[in-house]
Amino acid sequence: MVKRARTAVTVAFVTNGFVVGAFIARIPDFKQILGLRDGQLGTALLCSSIGLLIGLGPSGRLSAKRGSAWVAVPAAISLAISTVIVGLSHSLWQLSASLFLFGLFLGVQDVSMNAHAVVVEHETGKRIMSTFHATFSAGALAGGFTGGLLSQWKISIFQHTLGVAAVAIIAALILKPWWLPNEIDIHPIEKKRSRKRPAIFWALGLIVMCGQVGEGAAGDWGGVLSRGAFHATPFVSTLPFVFFSITMVIGRFMGDRLASRFGARILIIAGGLISAFGLASGLIFGGIGGVIFGWILLAAGSSIVLPLIFSIAGSMAKNRFSDRMAPAEGMAMVSGIAYFGFLAGPPTIGYMADQITLRWAMMIPAILGLCIALGTYFVIKEDNI
């Protein structure tokens, strides 16, 4: 049963990444077709941030009340449908509204599938969270690469999103029976005002948020920077994200093994430093080669931050704070803070780009890499792991 559940969760991560990667690959096309400035595109992306943040809290509570599998499968189908709606956008307001729905269902699926991943990890007794997130990156890589090709071949965004949605919906329906029973992670929710959320979860969320700003910006702005500042072709402009995704896959597949050997704390600190100095060096060097170099090292450093801290948060909620919050609620709390960076970071960089150019606005994730290292050093101790 656990093996089948692990497969179902893996496929959920893959298809989630595939949907996200497909959208990211077509962002430059939306900008060109709709004639948007960087700031206007940033506004549309901000709407997805708002939708995601609205969806996280209810998803955590509903997963705790009904079971994460009960939420995850319908959320996957809803996200796929919202992708098609995004593909139908023909104006800034339509794109903004559809991205709100996209972000909403992205948040709901993210919390529920990560909550189920924590359960599977505990049932197996092994570190596998980083591996799950590696499969997300693999899906994002596949989605970004095929999206770049379809853009180069001038396949319409609507046709592209229709195919992506079909793949995601079919996978969700076929593997629905493979998830663990809802009862396995149902947690009674007490409605007491005195129930405080442990401060450590705020700190963990802020650390991940710093990493997610870079991860979101790498996807949303890599193609725009390559095409706008360095005059790359549509396919070449997808290469920074493609190499970013390849490195994310490798880093996350290695993450569980490296964390078991060196400790999660040391690994996260090193990751923050690598992403900071790597991205800054690539941006200073410039050109397509510099962008690809910066994106690769940004991925190498940030790849393990989110899954390792998600694993820490889930374990802490289950083992140390079970009387104060369910693992799904802890996951939703950390996710809410973290993904604020993932989705609010790119539009913020877009606004900054209007003032100081996109190339130098991308220095923000490099600075936040240093914040990851410092935050982890002071916040996370060995007994938290």
Image (tube, rainbow, N blue to C red):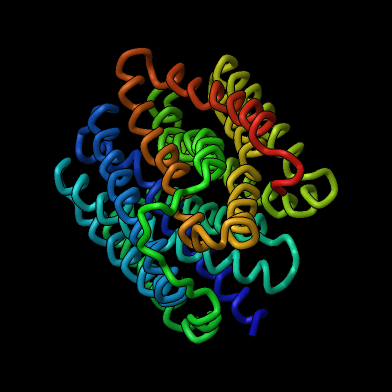
382 horizontally vs 11: left or right: right
Residue 300 appears anywhere in the view: yes
Task: Where is residue 168? Give x, y as percent.
Answer: 42, 70
Task: Where is residue 58? Give x, y as percent.
Answer: 33, 60
The residue located at (45%, 20%) in the rendering is 359
**Above/below status of 11 relative to 265:** below
Task: Where is residue 29? Give x, y as percent.
Answer: 31, 42
Front residue of 146 and 186: 186
The residue located at (42%, 47%) in the rendering is 336
The residue located at (66%, 67%) in the rendering is 121
Q: How many marks?
A: 0
Front residue of 362 and 1: 1
The residue located at (68%, 26%) in the rendering is 273
Front residue of 86 and 322: 322
Residue 168 appears anywhere in the view: no
Residue sitting farthest toward the front: 194
Residue sitting farthest toward the right: 261
Front residue of 49 and 247: 49
**Above/below status of 351 relative to 239:** above
Task: Where is residue 219? Give x, y as percent.
Answer: 46, 40
Figure quadrant of the N terminus = bottom right
